[in-house]
Amino acid sequence: MVESSKIKVSIIKMDDYNDSTVTAQKVAEAIDAAGGLPEKFCPSTKVLIKPNMLTAKTPEFAATTHPEIVRAIIKYLRNFGITDITVGDSPAGTFSWDELWDKTGFAKLAEEEKVKLIPFENVKRLNVNNMTIPMLRELDDFDAVISVPKLKTHMLTKITGAVKNSYGLMPGNAKSNFHGDYPSPRKMATFIAQIFGIRKPDFIVMDAVFSMEGEGPSSGEPVNTGLLFAGIDAAAVDACACAAYGYTPLDIPLLVIVGKLGYGVIDMDKIEMTGDGVQKLMALNAKKSISDMLHRFPEPIFKLSTYFLSCRPYIMPEKCRNCGLCAEACSQKAICKAKNNKRFTVKNRGRCILCMCCVESCPFHAIKLINPGMKLKRIFDFIKGLFHKTT
Ligand code: SF4
Ligand code: SF4
C-alpha cells in the first residue's frame, strides 16, 4: 500500500469543555487521527506544553486556551508513559504571574495534575539573520514542545493560531517592543515567521471549541465553533483552521511567508483533512476582525488608512482606573494623560500601530476597539440623548 505523503490535520467535533472525560476522549481522538505523536516522543521525553495565555482573563472570554484541553493532553502523555511535563507561557501584559495563572485556570490545573507551571521570563539571546532575538532560556531543556493555541482573530495577522502561538516563546515585554520595530502587518508577519522558525513545535492541538471572532486577539466575542484541530505541522493546522473565518491560507500573510520560508505546508493540495469535523469547519462563518479591510491597502498607506478609519483602541472612562499600565505597554508612546491630567487616553492616534499591547495589558478590560461605525453610533446616541432632554 502506498502511504499518503500529505500532511495530516485532524478536525474533530467537540461541543464544550464541561465533561473532562469526554474532553480527554476527544483530544485523544484528535491526536490519533492526525497520526499520533511523532517518533521522538517516548516515556523519558521532557515535554513543554505551550498554551496561549495571552492575558489574565477567565476561559469564558475565549482569549486563552481552555485549561481542560491542556488537562486532556497531560492525560494522553501520561498514558503514553511520559511524566516530565511542564506548562508555561509569557504574556506581554503587566499583571502578576499569580493573577494570570489564577484567572486563566492554569494554577488549579497545575495543582490538580501535579505538573510544573513556569513563567517564561528568563532570556537567552540568539543571533538570527543578524538580529538579536531574546528567547526563552529554558527552551533547550525540553526534548519536545506541544503547542496548544486558541483559534482567534487578530488585528495584525488576521488570525492567531498555531504559528503565532510560537511568538510566546519570546519572554515578556520584548514582544511589544518588536511591534514598534515592525509597525506594519507584513513586516510583523515576516518577523513572527522568523521567530516561529527558531523552534517549531513538535505537535499541535488547537482549541477551537470556543474561538474568538471580531476584534481579537483579546477584545472579540467568543463563538462556539465546536472543533479541535491536531497535527504535526503548525502552518498546515492554521491553513485549515482559517476556513472558520472564510479565509484561505493565501489570505493570511503570515502563513504565506511561513510557506515560502519552508517552515510549514500551506498548500491545501498537500494537506489531508481528516475527522468528523471537516464538514462543520467548511460551514462555519465566524466574524473577521474589522481590520481585515485594512490589509487590502498598499503597505505605505497602512498607517494613514488606520488613522483615517479610526480603527484603534479606545479607553472607556467608566471602566478605566487610571493605573497607567497601558501607557507603559505602548511601545509607540501613543497613550498618555490628557492635558487636564485627569485620565489616560490614546492621544497620539497617528502613532498607533494596532499592536493590541495596551488592550492585552489592561487589567480592568477598559480598552476596546472602535471603528467609524461605532463612533457614528456614539455621536448619534449623544444627539438622541440631547433630543430626549429637550422634549
Ligand atoms: S485603560 Fe486600563 S491599563 Fe490603561 S490606565 Fe485605564 S485601567 Fe489602567
Ligand atoms: S495605543 Fe495600543 S494598539 Fe496602539 S500602538 Fe499603543 S499599545 Fe499598540
Image (tube, rainbow, N blue to C red):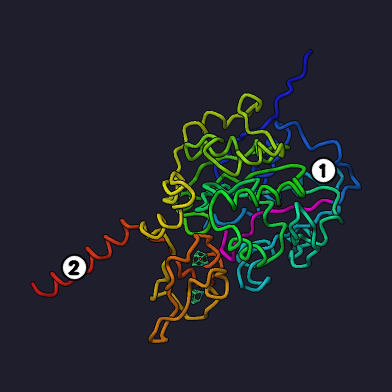
Tell me: residue 352, above or below residue 208.
below
When asked about the image quadrant of residue 121, the answer is bottom right
Asked if the residue under mark 2 is in contact with the one under mark 1, i.e. CB atoms within 8 Å, the reply is: no
Upstream in sequence: badge 1 or badge 2? 1
How far apart are the two marked residues, 1 and 2, measured between alpha carbons? 63 Å
Type of residue at label 2? Ile
Mark 2 residue element = helix
Give the residue displayed 70% in from the left and 43% down from the top: 204
In this rendering, the count of numbered labels is 2
Q: Position of residue 32 (x, y in %)?
A: 73, 33
Q: Closer to us: mark 1 or mark 2?
A: 2
Q: Is residue 362 left or right of residue 388?
A: right
Q: Is residue 154 left or right of residue 44?
A: left
Whether the residue carrying mark 1 lies under 8 Å from ligand 2 is answered with no
Q: Which mark is residue 383?
A: 2
Between residues 222 and 257, which one lies in front from this camera angle?
257
- Residue beneath label 1, please? 79
